[in-house]
Structure formats: structure tokens, C-alpha cells
Amino acid sequence: MYRFLDRHLADLDEGARITVDAVRKWVTAVAERKCPADAVAPLFLDRRLIGAMAPFHRALTLLAVHGRMQLGFARECCPVVAEGEALLLSLLDRTSDRRRTCLAAVNEPYVEALQQAVMELEAAMQVAGLAPGSAGR
């Protein structure tokens, strides 16, 4: 996670930038009591990521509802990666210990569900040519 924290968005690959943008749109929509799926749909549709919508929504919902801690997220105009965004980027990074990160992020009964959502999100990003394994490198 710390590999991504406070990194400039311009230094991230396209998949990571899209992920951060989607997270910020989702969090903003929830804060404004709007539908988060509607908020991210155009971003996902424009990049052939419709298959990523459901697992993305599940992952963020699990983090929001069953998270072990309250995560910080930046506004859409912020040029650097915030804590919550760095957590999701680290979960999408194939080189990270995904299970350990999930255990630290959500309460025990939800670890498997978060892992599954992240794996499905990663697969959808792979299909769209936005390999998250290179995020932040």
C-alpha cells in the first residue's frame, strides 16, 4: 500500500489512474447519497470495463461497510493518491500479498468475498488491456 500512497497520479499507469478516478467518483456519490454505480458507469463504459463494474462495487462496499478502519479518500481534483485508493491499488497489484492485505482491511468473515471481488476486478481490467500488475511502476 505504501508504494502507492502519496504518489502523483501522473506517475501511475493508465489502469491505476482509472482505478483512482473510479474510487473517487464512487466515494463522492455515496457521500452525496447518489447511486455509486451510476457515478462510475461512464468511466467504465468508455474503457470497455463493464465487466469490472460489479466486482468494483462489491470491493468498495465491503471496504466501506466491513472495513477494519475508516479509510481516507481524496477529492477528484487531488493530484496524489490517498490512503483508501492506495489500499485498492495494492490489492490489485499481483506482487502484493493480497490475502494479508484483505485480512488487514476487512473483518474476518468478509476476507474471502473481498479477495474474490478483487480477483474479478483484476480479470476484467486484464481483458480491457489495463493490467493492474504494472500499476505504480
Image: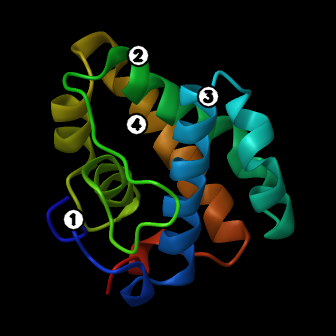
> Which marked residue is nearer to the observer: mark 4 or mark 1?
1
Mark 4 or mark 1: name the one nearer the start of the chain. 1
Q: Are marks 3 and 1 in contact (CB under 8 Å)?
A: no
Disc 1 residue type? Leu
Residue 115 marker = 4
Q: Earlier in the sequence, mark 4 or mark 3?
A: 3
Residue type at mark 3 is Glu
Instruction: Report the Cα–Cα distance between label 1 and label 2.
Output: 22 Å
Residue located beneath label 3 in the image: 32
Q: Position of residue 39 (x, y in %)?
A: 74, 43
Quadrant location of the N terminus?
bottom left
Instruction: Answer left or right for 42 relative to 133.
Output: right
Hey, what amino acid is under mark 4? Gln
| Residue underneath mark 1 | 5
Q: Residues within 10 Å of mark 3 (few under 14, many from 20)?
A: few
Q: Which residue is mark 2?
A: 65
Q: Residue at x 67, y 57 (%)?
A: 124
Q: Nearer the viewer, residue 114 or 5?
A: 5
- Give the percent coordinates (x, y) of residue 137: 32, 87
Q: Earlier in the sequence, mark 3 or mark 2?
A: 3
Could you tell me which residue is drawn at 63 percent across and 64 percent down? 125
User: CB under 8 Å between callouts 1 and 2?
Assistant: no
Residue at 37%, 54% in the rendered image: 85
Mark 1 or mark 2: which comes first in sequence?
Answer: 1
Name the N-terminal-most of marks 4 and 2.
Answer: 2
- Of badges 4 and 2, the one in the foreground is 2
Report helix, strand or loop for mark 4.
Answer: helix
Q: Which sits in the foreground, 34 or 90?
A: 34
